[in-house]
Each structure stands twice: as C-alpha cells, then as structure tokens.
Image (spheres, coloured by chain):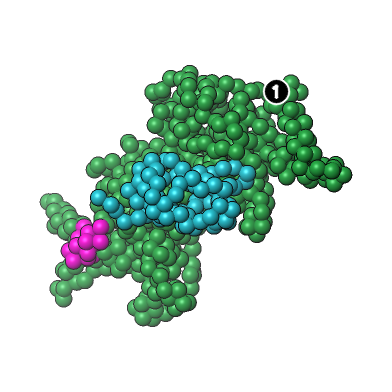
Chain colours: A green, B cyan
Amino acid sequence: MTWQPELDELRAREAEARKLGGADKIARQHAGGRLTVRERIEGVVDPGSFHEVGAIAGQAEYAPDGTLKRLTPSNCVMGRAQVDGRPVVVVGDDFTVRGGSADATIREKPIMAERMAHDLRLPIIRIIEGSGGGGSVKTIETTGRANLPGGVGGTQLYHYTGANLSVVPVVGLGLGSVAGLGAARLAASHYSVMTKETSAMFVAGPPVVKRLGEDLTKQELGGWEIQTKAGAVDHAVESEAEAFDCARRFLSYLPASVHALPPVTTPTDDPARREEKLFTHIPRDRRRVYQMRPIINAVVDQGSFFEMGRMFGRSIITGLARLNGKPVALMASDPFFYGGSWTADACAKIIRFVDLAETFHLPVVYLQDCPGFMVGLAAEKAATIRLGVRAMAAVNQTTVPWCTMIIRNAFGVAGVVHQPANRYSPRYAWLSARWGSLPLEGGIEAAYAADMAEAEDPAAKLAEIEERLNRLRSPFRTAEAFWVEEIIDPRDTRRLLCEFADLAWPLLTPAPSGLRMRP
Amino acid sequence: MAESPITIRAEIGASVWKILATPGAAVGEEEPILILESMKMEIPVVAPHDGVVVEILVAEGQQVEEGQAVATFRR
C-alpha cells in the first residue's frame, strides 16, 4: 500500500502551477524583455535554494467526473530561499496571470510571505510587477461588489508592508509596470531598484492620468528618470540580472533582522593603507569643487562602497561600505551639487539613511563638506528648514557609533549636524577644513553694516574686513582653543576610520532600536 | 562617424558663470564646457566623452534651472 495516486496528483497540480498563465502569456512576457516570476526568483536566490510555499493555490477547473482540468495558479509566488547561503523570504508577482492584479492573488499569500519574514526574522525580497491591490475595476463585475480598500481583514498586508521595515531588511524590485499597492510595496522598502527600459512605477498609470488631462507614456509618467530623481525608487539598472545583483549585494551588508548584528567579513584590505592622492585632492581655491567619490573609494575597503539613491538629494552621497571587514553606513557631501549644501531633498535622504543605520546597527561615517542649508527663495518654498530640523533630529536620535571627517566646509546649522549632539563621537578635521556660523561672503555685509555704511569706499572696506577675519579663522586658532579636537593629515583617514569601526563594533547591541522606521 | 548631437543639461539650478568652449571646439572627456556658480562655488559642466561642442544654449550671467539644456555636443 502506498499513497502513489495522491503523490501523482500533487505533482500534477504542481506541474500545472508551473505553467503560470500559459505559454502565450509567457511568450508575451519574454517578448517584452521581461522574465517570468519563477525565472526571477531563480535569478535572485542561490541556485536550487527556493522552497515554495503554497505552490498549488489557485483557481481550478474540474471535469464533470470531478477530475482536474486546469489549475490557474495564484499570481503570487512565494517561499523561502537563500542568498549567499543566508536564508531569506522571496515573494513575487506573476504578471502572466491577470497582469499581476490582486483579483488572482489569493489575498493571504503575500500576507503570509510578509508574516513569515517578520516572524522568522528573515530579510524579504519583493519582486513586483502589476498593481497587486484591490484588483482592476473588473473585479466589481466578477465579485458583484466594490472593494473598500483594506476593508474587513484586508489591512494585514498594509500592516506588514510598513511594519517589516522596523524588523527585517526589505528589498523591492520593480520589474515591469508597477502601480497602486505594487507601487506602495516598492516604495515601502529599505532599498528599491527598477529596470530602465522595461519598468515604470506610478500611483495610477497613463489611462487614469489621461482622464485628468495628462497624456503621457508609462516612461514619461513613472520611468526611472522620474522616480529615481524624485527619490521614490533608489536605483535603476539596465537589466533584471543587474537588479538581482543589487538586491544580493545590499543584503550582504545587513543582518537578517534587527535581532542580529551586521555580518563581518574577513578583511582583505590593509587598514593602514595611505592614499597619497588624498593630500592633493582638495583644491586650495575654495571656490573650486572636487569629486567626493574617489575619496570614499580611497578610504573604505577596496571595492566595498555600495551607493544607494544616487539620483536623489544629490548634494549628499549615501551608501554602505566596509571598514576592515565591518559594514558601515557612509554619507558624504558632494560639492558638485549646490556646493554640498543641504537641500530639502538631501535632508529627506539623510533622514531615511540614518534611520536605516539605526535600525540595523550600522556605525555611521560622515565625510562632511557642508556650507549650510541651501538658501534662496526656492529653498524657503521647499521648507528646507523643516526637513533640515527633521534631519537634525534623526541624527540626534541615532544611538549607533558615529565618526565624522570634516573634509572642507562646516557652516551654519546644517554644519552643526555633523555628529549626534548627545554623546562622544570621534571627529577629525582635514587640513583643508574651514568653518564658521556663516560664510564671510554676505556674512560681512550683515555683521558690519554700520562700518560699511560709514566707509567712503565700501568695497575697500569689505576687502579690509574680509582680510582681517580671514587671518583669524585658520583652523589652528580653533584647535588651540580646543574648539575642535583634532586636525589630521588626510592620508591618515583610512587608518582612523578602520580604528573607529574596530572600536564601534563591541558597542553594538543586537536588539531592536527604539526607533520605528518609516518608509 | 558623426553621431547625432546629445543635449547637455545643468544638474542644478545656478547662474552661468563662465563659458569656456565655443561651438566647434574639441573637448576631452571630463573637461569643462562651461562653469556654473551655485552657493559661491564654481561647478563645472563637463563633456561626457571626447567630442565637439555643437551649440552653447546659454549666456554668462544667465540663470538656469535644474535639468535645463545648456549645450549640445557630439562625438
């Protein structure tokens, strides 16, 4: 006696499910330059590691004698797998079944995937294509009623979509047209990637927007250039394979959950390595800019810098890196964008980034060159100061170890926020560092208005005052009063940062932060 | 092989401080075509690769918006 007939039926149903929406729909998916959900899952996880949950859930058709004719699988495929040998949860939309729409999802499948990640404390990779929300308007006819968003019992997915951010790493991959709840699940991630040619993300797509008088293509409405500059998606890549690499690499810096510390790798780079070019990299002419990324790459473990959100809030560069094998969250100014000043967008970027560091116990390194908040009418209209004080609060609310290198400018309130205000944090000033409450340019006119008004030659007076002040503002005079604790040779930067990472590590606690991270 | 010109855009809102290259000038990769001024800093707008400036679309002293076309360029 065996259970062979039942085993045969199980295998037959699994085989049906693997046909997805059928050969025609799969061919259409491929013709559009996009992989199927199962190909995507195989592509992002370690080969052969995917263990599917709920494979045979779907809509069945039966013959009059009760035998199975066809099983259309749910368009949510999910389960556990491994990435670089570490367990993860992966959940993907199947666009070949009802265009990834929720009417074919079976509501509990994506909820269980999110809950599994939450309760097993595993990172989750969301592969998103389609809408995945309450379904298309067609569901009004197929169900005979309209859907109250969330409704009764439908809020679980929305709960985990946000709540998981405080518990496990969440990666979102947008690999086709992504709308509605799909867009929400993509944006509500720690790190999101979209493909350039084949994906677009929007709250509602072109047909809906057209009714409001905007006639736009998918790319014009929500393509990568729109969404990465807006900061709704972090990164854009040429191919799905690249998106998978990004997801895997992002996870390599992070713990499986907030209940563990980030994974330390065997150091491959000399912690005392000195880069000669750092001695000449900053122009003496303070009006001239320089590239920050070569500095980052010179001081972190070679090849370890992983930038996130490059196209948004560009006066700040954010990314993950390793120092002597230890993962850190690194942010740095980019003087090519508004001289490195903190715009409203840059502040929004900083808030989300330091929240990520605090959530996953990543020490923070900040390479600062900040002339202050962005100024001017446009900056005021963008509520730069509101976003600015939120960024200040976010920095001050961190508890992870923090190290600052003042590369050049530190001016004004934004200049203050170069380290948390409430604890000791190592800080070093490069030889090129300059600081003040206000830059001299404009600052003199404000502070010496009376002298200027009385002067016969205001321009000469301005130059005279400027020269007087410049003589006094050498950083050495600041250091002699111990208003800054250390000025360093920039070539010592890597050694000091690696020492910081080594000192920081024993201070980290694998316990949830008091912070509840928002998307 | 001459390719069709590409548009070079300002990546920030700024004023045009100095124009360095005239139409027809050969410019190497990463070399500046013009310099913007923002927050009292000189921000170069550089050639994306070796090529020739086709047209300069702005004048010194002019304000430009983020994303505004400032020059056209071809390989």
**Viewer-closest of A200 and B59:** B59
Q: How dense is the environment of label 1, judged by Cα within 10 Å: few (below 14), some, or many (20 and up)?
A: some
How far across and how far down the image is residue A171, in percent?
41, 48
Residue corresponding to mark 1: A476
Residue that appears at 75% across and 28% down: A472
Rendered view: A340 above or below B4 = above
**Viewer-closest of A71 and A421:** A421
Residue A387 left/right relative to A159: right
How far across and how far down the image is residue A162, in percent?
50, 54
Residue that appears at 61% across and 25% down: A431
Magenta region's main secondary structure? Answer: helix
How far across and how far down the image is residue A42, in percent?
26, 47
Residue that appears at 22% across and 64% down: A28
Viewer can see residue A389: yes
Dot 1: element: helix
How far across and how far down the image is residue B3, in percent?
29, 53
Disc 1 chain ID = A
Residue A389 left/right relative to A79: right
Q: Amino acid at mark 1?
A: Phe
Magenta-colored span: A17-33
Q: How many marks?
A: 1
Residue A250 is covered by the magenta coloring: no
